[in-house]
Image: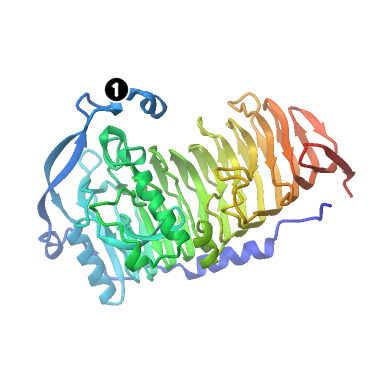
Amino acid sequence: MYKKFEWNQELYNLIENTVNDNIMKFDNKTEYKVDDIKYKNLGRDIEEVYLTHPDGPYKGSKKELKNDKEYIGKSLVKNTQNVTYYGDAIQKAIDDATSNGGGKVIVSGGSKEEPNVYYSGAITLKSNVELHIEENAVIKFVRNKNNEFYPLEYTRWEGIEMMNFSPFIYSYGAENIAITGKGILDGNADEFNWMPWKFGYFNEEDQQIQRERLFDLGQENADVRTERIFKDDISTIRPPFIQPYKSKNILIRDVTILNSPFWEINPVLCENIKVDNIIIDTHLYNNDGVDPESCKYMIIENCKFSTGDDCIAIKSGRNNEGRNIGVPSENIIIRNNKFEDGHGGVTIGSEISGGVNDIFAHDNYFDSPELDYPIRFKTNAERGGKLEKIYVKNSVVNKSKIAVIHADFFYEEGVNGNHNPILRDITLSNIKTIEGGSIDASNALYLKGFKDAPIENILIENAELNGVKGDMVLQNVKGLAFKNVCINNVKVDDKIIDVDDDFNAKEYALN
């Protein structure tokens, strides 16, 4: 039976105050300018290696490329160009700043017509340092896929810990760090560089081989530093763009992120994180926008997402790894964001074995032409996880293909596992679709739990879910409450329903 579950304003205020009070202010810190002669002189000429296709760029979509066997069957052409490499200069400025008690490392901008471009490899942020990329400055990450430019680091990939290529911007055990400025971070990935590993296109190695090896090592609890080593001679595991690891008091503000090889912003085991007013514009496979993993006290606000996958995906580790570490993602605010492109809007899962709780999402606008699910929960009997205390309100959906609100325990492994998930205590309030816009979802609601692990205690109130093709697909749902809900301009009776494994519903009065 349904039990009332309401917005926890006291906890919301605590999250906001905790994050803001712990973000370091760098206004009066010493400045370290990468353009100063002592750092600029560290710039050096290197040979950047990159790949192109003998027939030129592909003219169609990603879906069309996948099916064009003739095009993807051709080998890529190796090219080189000489560039000035500033990675050593940027890193030296960061090292100097942290050694001297902290400071602001400034990457200077040029003009709109001629921006300053700084080629770099992996950058390691350290405590008490702000990396500030000025407007009309671009840090462009070289396409040389080797450990010279992306050394082995302790990282997490799809919920599994490993030694792999360094994330493009990385920290480990740091505190009081920031990435700011109106400049651009360009990962320089495209359909021919980094991305072919996804499927083994163009006679490149297939990521799936090393991916399965990694997952097996995770299940075996193999030692990360001695047994899970993926050097450049074997690794096809694309690194995330920005990954603070076991760090705290983190600010990422105002920057634009382009062309990532994998996930964009992926804090792991971090606390006190603020992502504010960033633009993400990257459309390759697995280009998630912001993916907090096993993090607590976080605010994601005022951002613009245009991605090739989930815009925001909250995670907490995969399978045994996630359960053994056992750290949930919790106390996260997601507000005032615009989702312009991406398959998922606010997603919880699928690497969610450590659980998630106390998520507040409000005043978000979903308008992606490729959006399948504005609000999505995804897990299964192998991932498991306890997902609870999630609040969504005051949001507008202009596009959705599959369902406005989607929860499916049958994702990937489905029932094949011994770790039934828990999904309960969810409130969705004042959610509106734009009838006459581009909304064409198959269903307003799609909620499918397991017979012995039903989805429980869901409140949908003050919702207008119009312009959808179907009403609801419900299976193994217990305590689904409707209060002042319209679907296709027809009011749903205020009621509570339970739905069994055979899709049969029982209705109860809403007290």
User: 395 above or below 370?
Assistant: below
Determine crowd level at label 1: few under 14, some 14-19, many 20+ residues with C-alpha closer than 10 A. Answer: few
Quarter of the image where one finds residue 9: bottom right
User: 475 above or below 290?
Assistant: above
Identity of the residue drawn at 33% across and 24% down: 69
| Number of numbered discs | 1
Can you identify the residue that label 1 sits on? 70
In this orientation, does residue 322 appear? yes
Identity of the residue drawn at 27% across and 70% down: 30
In this orientation, does residue 258 appear? no
Q: How is the image coloured?
A: rainbow
Of residues 245 and 415, the one nearer the viewer is 415
Quarter of the image where one finds residue 282: top left
Identity of the residue drawn at 55% across and 50% down: 349
Query: Residue 74: where, in percent of width, then height?
Result: 24, 28
Query: Residue 402: where, in percent of width, then height?
Result: 60, 32
Mark 1 element type: helix
Q: Is residue 466 left or right of residue 195?
A: right
Query: Residue 459: where, in percent of width, then height?
Result: 76, 48
Identity of the residue drawn at 58% across and 30% down: 401
Query: Residue 145: where, in percent of width, then height?
Result: 23, 49
Amino acid under disc 1: Glu
